[in-house]
Amino acid sequence: MPHFRIDCSEPVLSIATPEEIIDAVHDTAEDSELFRKGDIKVRIVPFSHYTSGGTKDDFIHITADIMGGRSTEQKQLLSRSIVARLKPMFSSVQLVSIDIRDIDPETYTNLAKL
């Protein structure tokens, strides 16, 4: 935990490689000191079929699922830091966003908890 899923238009991958994008999100999450390095998971899902406000404009949207317990201020700083890190990499992409969601620690289960 946490899980960062990067949805993007496929052409974004011609601006930066998947590895560069994943590393930017991972490193920014690690720099936040909210998570242990070995717990951060980042995935990228490029889309070739999409519409963005009725257009084919490129986009990047990150959904971050993190264990509950962080303050609103911590989550705001994390989201702003990630978007700020991506902004210079993707100056031509007008739609870069992130949504941070809390996971309920009482109902979250993985194999280690069984």
Image (tube, grey):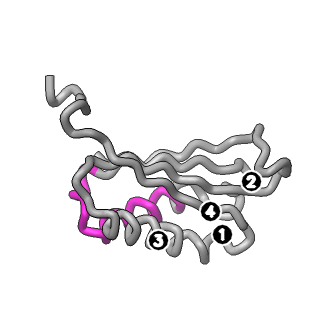
Measure the alpha-carbon separation of dots 2 and 3. Answer: 24 Å
Measure the alpha-carbon separation of dots 1 and 3. Answer: 15 Å
Q: Which label sits on residue 96?
A: 4
Q: Which residue is mark 1?
A: 90
Q: Which label sits on residue 100?
A: none
Query: Residue at the spot x=48%, y=56% of the render?
Result: 22
Mark positioned earlier in the residue sequence (1 or 3): 3
Q: Which residue is mark 2?
A: 11
Mark positioned earlier in the residue sequence (4 or 3): 3
Query: Residue at the spot x=76%, y=41% of the render?
Result: 50
Measure the alpha-carbon separation of dots 2 and 4. Answer: 14 Å
Q: Amino acid at mark 1?
A: Phe
Nearer to us of marks 2 and 3 is 3
Q: Which residue is mark 3?
A: 80
Measure the alpha-carbon separation of dots 4 and 3. Answer: 11 Å
The image quadrant of residue 95 is bottom right
60 horizontally vs 39: left or right:
right
What segment is highlighted magenta in the picture?
Answer: 21-39
